[in-house]
Image (cartoon, rainbow, N blue to C red):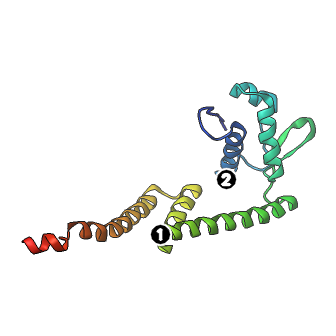
Amino acid sequence: MLMSVDDTLPVPLYRQIRDQVVSGIAQGQLEPGMSLPSVRALAADLGINLHTVNKAYAVLRDEGYIYMKGRAGAVVASPLDADRADIAQVEQSKMEDALFKMALAHRARGGTRGEFLEAAAAQAARAYGVMPEEASAAEKRKEAAAEKRRAPARAAAKAPTGAEGALT
């Protein structure tokens, strides 16, 4: 798996590395038992400080995605590891809390439950690699819902006000 970082992004470099490793695991590019590049090798390849890579690996280890195997370095963990199951439960709880907060914010801005679910489903489709035609159907439904919301505002803008209606 080829990794890269972009120092112009607002995302910290260690987080970019972490996100790429998690994505590689999710997409099957990195399988349990596979070794990741050494801290020094990856830092040299990316042209960054080795402490940045070390921090990324520490975060991945703490989240249960990898484990450190002495001189062999960082190794992709199995999803069946007991420690990882506990971490997964904590992560599930964090995800549910984050989704709840996003749903409340969406509702406070006047969004509907259907719109929120549609957006969440579209992002899940991206994460799980749904076929493009399925994703485009979701986009079409999203655009239709947005158009439906805009229609009353356009109708109100076109309707004559009391003074204009009296002149015609």
Q: Identify which amino acid the numbered label 2 is placed on.
A: Ala
Residue 33 in sight here: no
Nearer-N-terminus badge (1/2): 2
Judge by depth and name the residue closer to the eye, 62 or 23.
Answer: 62
Compared with residue 140, is residue 72 higher up or lower down, i.e. above or below?
above
- The answer to whether the residues at label 1 and label 2 have Cβ atoms under 8 Å apart is no
Q: Residue at x 30, y 71 (%)?
A: 152
Residue 111 is marked as: 1
Q: Residue at x 55, y 64 (%)?
A: 120
Where is residue 27 shown, x and y percent of the image?
64, 51
Where is residue 63 shown, x and y percent of the image?
80, 53
Residue 138 in sight here: yes
Q: Identify which amino acid the numbered label 1 is placed on.
A: Gly
* Residue position for label 2: 26
Determine which quarter of the picture holds residue 2: top right
Judge by depth and name the residue closer to the eye, 85 or 150.
Answer: 150
Rendered-image quadrant of the C terminus: bottom left
Compared with residue 1, is residue 161 higher up or lower down, i.e. above or below?
below
Residue 136 is marked as: none
Disc 1 versus disc 2: distance between alpha carbons? 31 Å
